[in-house]
Amino acid sequence: TGTNSNKLFVPGNVKYEFTLVENADGSLTLSYAEAKEEETEAPTTEETEAPTTEETEAPTAEETEAPTTEETEAPTTEETEAPTTEETEAPTKVTNLVASDVTDTSVTLKWDAFAGATKYWIYRNGFAYTDTTETTYTFSALNTNTTYAFGVAAVVDGVMTEQVTISVTTLVEVTEAPTTEETEAPTTVELEVGYYLVGTLNGENLWGVEALTADRMLKANPGNEGEYMLDWTFYDGDAIKVVYFDGEQIAQWFNDGGEDYHIDGKKDGDNTIYFRPEGNDSWSYFYFTVPTTETEDPTTEETEAPTDAPTDAPTDAPTDAPTDAPTEAALPAGYYLVGKTNGVESWTVETLSIDRLMKDEDGDGIYTLYWTTYNGDEYKAVYYNGTSFENWYPNTADNYKIGSAEKTGYCLVQCSPEGKLTNSNKVFSINKA
């Protein structure tokens, strides 16, 4: 009785709807029709399977692998390696060296404190000038319109760091513009090619090419071909050499590698230096000489080569040199430094020269001389009576040997015949000046 409705599916996934109706006579009528598909089941299969694979697998690979490589490896390399390099290279030398308060006669240097430094060595034109425990130093009494090379090196646990240098030019007047023009032009353009006097002159270290000036250029000696000369005011204690300037740099030194030529009280004042690039055997320093100003005989001897006619100089000078008579006659009695300097042996009367004479400047019985020494040198002092040697200091078989940095370079030599020195032998010592 009544109406029954059922939903069925046939093969092929085609859906039909069947209706069974009971007629008045009690019979049953079955009818069917194709039903509309429902939109809930088919889309469900597609939306759950396909999207699930894409949304879980593809995004997972991208979001976990790619970001991991970038965020963990790249930043790690940059943050660990770069700072390490900077921290190891930084403390090798003094930093931020600057010059301030530059005037025509003074310059103040300033720099950053160096970790662990007990003191700082100050340099001027390549030579050690002084030391300080401060991080600033002022040079005074400088020459006007002059370029200086200043340097600073720290000392840590007795070891010196690399030197830092700075070039500074003192002023001409109050303004800086004339300073730049007047210091650069003479050095690079106006200085002629030729021979120049360099050295420690009246306390100033004038050794480098930046310190060359036109007034120290030697001119040809009109009285002697191949010889050069320069009138100059020398001071007791000056140490000098002659150099050849090729227009850009110092190309040759005279004496190259040998000791400096020292000016004493007998050669200071207004004087003349005579120089021969080929050398002169009658001169004790070979390349040049500065005549003695106190007595006539030494002056005659030293200036004989320039005074003679050009034909006599090459012939007579080498011939007369072996006789030694002029040399011995010119040398006064006194205490002299003898020994081996930079490989050159000078132990005999024949090798004595006036620049080796030691003087008792203070009248205390201690004779002194400033001399340039080299590692491996050997020395003694000797008393020369005008003809021969009498006494040696020290009077032992062992020579005084130079074997440390504290005793090489520009040094003070002392001899006390009465044994007043404080070192072990009491009579002879050499220490850096």
Image (cartoon, grey):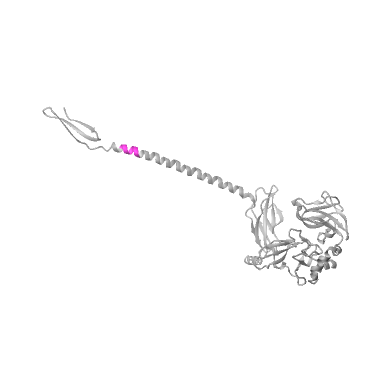
Q: Position of residue 401 (x, y in %)?
A: 79, 51
- As for residue 380 lying within the magenta part, the answer is no
- As for residue 48 lying within the magenta part, the answer is yes
- Residue 218, above or below 122: below
Q: Position of residue 201 (x, y in %)?
A: 74, 63
Q: Residue at x 40, y 41 (%)?
A: 58
- Residue 179, above or below 38: below
- Report the front residue among 15 and 184: 15
Viewed as shown, does residue 101 lie left or right of 285?
left
Q: Position of residue 103 (x, y in %)?
A: 66, 63
Which quadrant of the rendered structure holds the N terminus? top left
Q: Is residue 293 something that shows in the picture?
A: no
Q: Position of residue 174 (x, y in %)?
A: 65, 66
Q: Quadrant of residue 172?
A: bottom right
- Report the front residue among 49 and 114: 49
- What's drawn in magenta, residue-wise? 44-50
- Residue 28, above or below 95: above
